[in-house]
Amino acid sequence: MVKAVLHELRLMAIALQFFTRVPVPARVGFEPAWLNASARHFPLVGLLVGGVAALALAVGSQALGTAIGVWLSIAATVWLTGAFHEDGLADTCDALGGAVSRERALEIMKDSRIGSYGAVALVLVLGLKAATLASLPLALAVPALLLAHTASRAAAVVLIRVLPYAGEVSQAKAKPLAQKVSALGVAVALGWVVLLAGALVALRWAWWPYVALALAGVLLGTIACGRWFRRRLGGITGDTLGATQQITELLALQGWVVALRWA
């Protein structure tokens, strides 16, 4: 039992190290298989990132105003993750924005340079995030960020499970993530989302429509991204997972705005 708990803590640390700049002690160790297994805790890393975003928003808004607080929140997540997911969004849109073959799209994803489609996608998505957060009162924006960052990481885990890897596994930047996540891994990842959603509703029952619409947005975004990637690439790549996270995060946040307008 103790060994099992320690192993899960190790997997959490590996997921944290993979997705953020947070230093992890060398004694944690590393084995390739652990990275694939750590996918079950990606939503937990999202919760941490969302917590940093919420803190930056709250402090920035109180000290400098809502507009600056919103941009500080976005900047904090970009810095904390090293623009990991934003880079995936840009590469995906560069590759799939034009009418190119599957092979050419995969080649474009490997190019470190950003093109017009990627630049426009970043401006639109980051701008929409900012506008969405600015449309929410602080009391709603904080839980919205926590749920959006958590659920959007689970969306990526689901796609790893249901879609094959589209590129050459031998050339994948993170080969263990080119392999399917186990059913247990997906269940745990979704469990983190359910726990957070339940906690938010338990904390304030009036939030249930906001939570429900946010999760609906993540679900629809995951389905749409999955269909898009299957049709154009035959599966996923690391970049498309980053794009999925960004798109579903935005849709989750917008779910709170829709619920607010209906309230």
Image (cartoon, grey):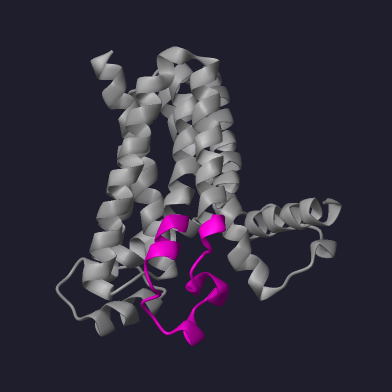
Quarter occupied by residue 3: bottom right
- Relative to 128, 208 lies left or right: right
| Position of 92 relative to 43 (above/below) | below
**Quarter of the image where the C terminus is located:** top left
| Position of 34 relative to 127 (above/below) | below
How many numbered markers are drawn? Answer: 0
- Relative to 35, 260 lies left or right: left
| Position of 129 relative to 136 (above/below) | below
Q: Nearer the viewer, residue 79 or 141?
A: 141
Q: Nearer the viewer, residue 67 or 110?
A: 110
Residue farthest to the left, as pictured: 99
Can I make out residue 91 in this image?
yes
Residue drawn at point x = 85 percent, y = 51 percent? 2
Asked if residue 177 is among those painted magenta in the image, a careful observer would answer: yes
The residues colored magenta run 157-185
Residue drawn at point x = 56 percent, y = 57 percent? 185
Can I make out residue 126 in this image?
no
Residue drawn at point x = 38 percent, y = 73 percent? 164
Give the x, y percent position of residue 256: 35, 26
Quarter occupied by residue 175: bottom right
- Relative to 158, 188 lies left or right: right
Residue drawn at point x = 50 percent, y = 36 percent? 194
Give the x, y percent position of residue 217: 31, 39
- Relative to 35, 25 lies left or right: right
